[in-house]
Amino acid sequence: PEDPATSYAELQRWSVEELDTFWRAIAEWFDVRFTTPYRSALGEDRMPGATWFPGATLNYAEHALRAGEDPDRAEQPALLHVDEAQQVTPVSWADLRRQVGSLAAELRALGVRPGDRVSGYLPNVPQATIALLATAAVGAVWTSCAPDFGARSVLDRFQQVEPVVLFAVDGYRYGGKSHDRTETVAELRREMPGLRAVVHVPLLGAPAPEGALAWDDLTSADVEPAYEQVPFDHPLWVLYSSGTTGLPKAIVQSQGGILLEHLKQLALHCDLGRDDRFFWYTSTGWMMWNFLVSGLLTGTTVVLYDGSPGYPGTDAQWRVAELTGATFYGTSAAYVMACRKADVHPARDLDLTRLRCVATTGSPLPPDGFRWLRDEVAGPDGELWIASVSGGTDVCSCFAGAVPVLPVHLGELQAACLGTDLQSWDPQGKPLVDEVGELVVTRPMPSMPIHFWNDPDGTRYHDSYFDTYPGVWRHGDWITLTSRGSVVIHGRSDSTLNRQGVRMGSADIYEAVERLPEIRESLVIGVEEPDGGYWMPLFVHLAEGTRLDDRLRDRVKTTIRAELSPRHVPDEIIEVTAVPHTLTGKRLEVPVKRLLQGTPLAKAVNPGSVDNVELLRFYEKLGQERAAAR
């Protein structure tokens, strides 16, 4: 038999060399319903500005609800909602279709028209999925934030796109506590004068505020969904970059582009179908939520978990997987490493026999994470597909990751995805193999942004991806493409460590240091200094009851030297009270680097996108002290 690695590599090469034929084949294979036909799959073949399926019209929501047209599926669950009390509430395909139909008719009655923006300030509950699908059904443009975002953060996002409707909760539950959001919602209403309607979703049981519409009143009619047939490149939703500096980028993706990209990604790469249950731990403020909802496109039952990742215990997500019979479960690399540290034993303590794949994203999964999943999650037969994936909000998909027919190598992503011309380039634009380079995509993908909101001449879009290599998407990650076709991600290229001309990913250092039980979390920064020098401090958040003495400092350095190289050893090890993150949980490497280079806090970071802005004052002060001492 043919080696699957060779045959996949050939298929992948064909898929990027023959983009037009490949995407036509995807549309035909998945029986995409075009109301008007297309002339070609790829119209304009350029970046930015590629055009896809010119002339075609369709509707994303129609495809997401298509499985419910089958009478045999009508009463089966489309959604399984789980809360922190581990209560499972199903929503059948028939009920999902009915509620989407009812809400879409009400949106039309409110005057919502194709192209209007509809916003959600909602957690990962069925109402958010229903509101997204009803918005898409009428051809309007969806955008959402999670309710743990404060008012300023939400306004930085929503005010850019000027929504006409706001769906908002009265509060949410997280970590065993209720968090009231009525004041925040009142502020959002005051600051968004263009709102024609506010829909109250009473998660905590509060009465609807004055002038708001009640969710149940809008979703109780028995109405078949009516789908607006829109052009392929009609906007579907607006996502936001983590926005660590300046206003978050408002990234617009198309109905058709997302439909085709997600069918390819979920059905072929994730191998999801009608018998699967798809669970990804996420919030509505992160692209993985949009990706999760798209599981409906493959007729899969989607698991919506609303709550803390580690409440009531570190093993909470594994318990959700057990309760719902998840077959494919996605989480963050950080959660896997936290479980390893907390001595969690999922396979021993829970029935995970239905689980065939654990996928991770957010940051590179270290080799120790792969080992832990194999040892503690795989069943007695040792069978478990570990899919480390990497992509971005910018394409709402993966560049590299899961391939069901390929082997899994420790610490590596299996391969570049179909239709994705993923390459690793040196600064001169020369492709590299088995060497670290810039992650670039040299041919267009249908889910690339059609534009950024409020970027009329496309300058901000161009500068975000295309200013380094003209006509080529530069993503801002360091990667290695191996000679066997697998992919290693090394971290962000704009905060990558570069000592004596040798580039190193911060992820390697975190993996080594955070193995030590004394280190809870760490942050390593490489600072180019005006005199040509290079300062590389390591900031450590210690476990309770631990002191940063010379013995621990030596252990950290010895560990890094032994596991990585002397070049990886930091110049200083400095204790901090906690490591600062974006609201989506990424370490704030680039803003901290700017603060250490002397940039004032106001210019180095957008405070609304940070989990705790006070943590950054320490780095600002340190940067100022170093500048003064020069």
Image (cartoon, rainbow, N blue to C red):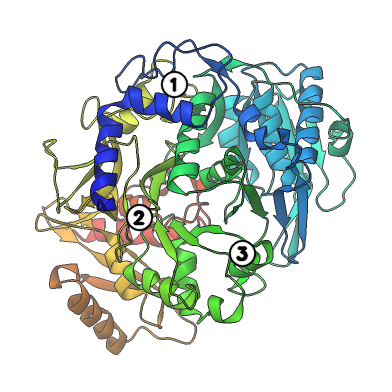
* Residue located at (28% from left, 29% from top): 443
| Foreground residue among 356 and 361 | 356
Residue 522 falls in which quadrant of the image? bottom left
Q: CA distance from mark 2 to mark 1?
A: 27 Å
Residue lying at 53% horizontally and 43% vertically, measured from the top left: 291
Instruction: Work out whether residue 559 or residue 179 is closer to the camera in this orientation and state it.
Output: 559
Mark number, residue 321: 3
Amino acid on which the number 3 mark rests in the picture = Ala
> Contact (CB < 8 A) between labels 2 and 3?
no
Position of 485 with respect to 211 (left or right) is left
Query: Badge 2 is on which residue?
Result: 589
100 is higher (above) or lower (below) than 411 = above
Q: Nearer the viewer, residue 482 or 624?
A: 482
Is residue 523 visible in the rendered image? The answer is yes
Which element carries disc 3, helix, strand or loop?
helix
Q: Position of residue 192 (x, y in %)?
A: 69, 28
Compared across the picture, whether 355 is left or right of 191 comes to left
SS at badge 2: helix
In front of the other: label 2 or label 3? 3
- Pointer 2 local density, CA inside 10 Å: few below 14, some 14–19, many at least 20: many
Label 3 Cα neighbours within 10 Å, binned few <14 / some 14-19 / many ≥20: many
Q: Which residue is mark 1?
A: 455
Q: Amino acid at mark 1?
A: Asp
The image position of residue 425, as x and y in percent, is 17, 41
Secondary structure state at the residue bearing disc 1: loop
Query: Between 555 and 273, which is closer to the camera in this rendering?
Result: 273
